[in-house]
Image (cartoon, rainbow, N blue to C red):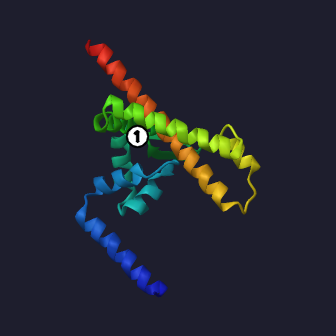
Amino acid sequence: MTADRWDDINERVREEWKADTTPFERVYEVIEQTHEGQSAADIAERALVSEPTARRHCKALVNTGFAETESDGRATLYKRNSDRVLMSRIRELREEANRDELLDGIRRMKAEIRRYEDRYDAVSPEELAQKLDADETEGWDDLSAWKTTRQNLAVAQAALAYDEASHQLTA
């Protein structure tokens, strides 16, 4: 497929997104995917809106707690509020899984982490990263999976703790 054809497809997708969503929805989606702070101008470009529109919607998202700001010395930068995203993941997991399912998942993830520790004789993915050569594809894949498992374990443990705290408060 030629580059021109890809450009045509990408432009069509952007136009459909613009037609099917409001400016606020597009700014929201861009912020939702923003881990590093970005200026209102950058967000506007990605969200297909004007800079003043992006800034207005970003400020509204900051006021609701969905986004947060930081400064680079010249401009205000906007990004999603990572604490809010984490709490949403914890609440979703708590609603999707009961206590026994959470405990079972925690046991399985702990066992998986122990297998990585034993396989690589390392106590963490960070230690493994120091041991791996650049061409060890399987090791780097396992490192990534280990990190993901560790993150998922932390969320599952937090969901379990949240569930237990909720029960204590209502008892």
Identify which residue is drawn at 43% across, 34% down. Answer: 156
Mark 1 closeness class: few <14, some 14–19, many ≥20 residues within 10 Å: some
Identify which residue is drawn at 73% across, 53% down. Answer: 132
Examine the rendered structure and indicate whether residue 70 appears above or below residue 25: above
Identify which residue is drawn at 49% across, 52% down. Answer: 39
* Front-lying residue, 157 or 88: 157
**Which x, y percent locates residue 134?**
73, 60
**Which x, y percent locates residue 9?**
37, 79
* Front-lying residue, 63 or 161: 161
Identify which residue is drawn at 49% across, 34% down. Answer: 154
Looking at the image, which residue sits at the far top?
A: 171
Image quadrant in which the N terminus is located: bottom left
Q: Secondary structure at mark 1?
A: helix
Examine the rendered structure and indicate whether residue 77 appears above or below residue 17: above
Please give left or right for residue 114 compared with residue 165 in the image.
Answer: right
Image quadrant in which the C terminus is located: top left
Examine the rendered structure and indicate whether residue 123 appears above or below residue 12: above
**Which x, y percent locates residue 46?**
42, 61
Residue hosting label 1: 85
Please give left or right for residue 85 compared with residue 166 in the image.
Answer: right
**Which x, y percent locates residue 114?**
60, 38
Q: Is residue 63 visible?
A: no
Q: Is residue 97 visible?
A: yes
Please give left or right for residue 117 compared with residue 28 in the image.
Answer: right
Please give left or right for residue 7 compared with residue 150 in the image.
Answer: left
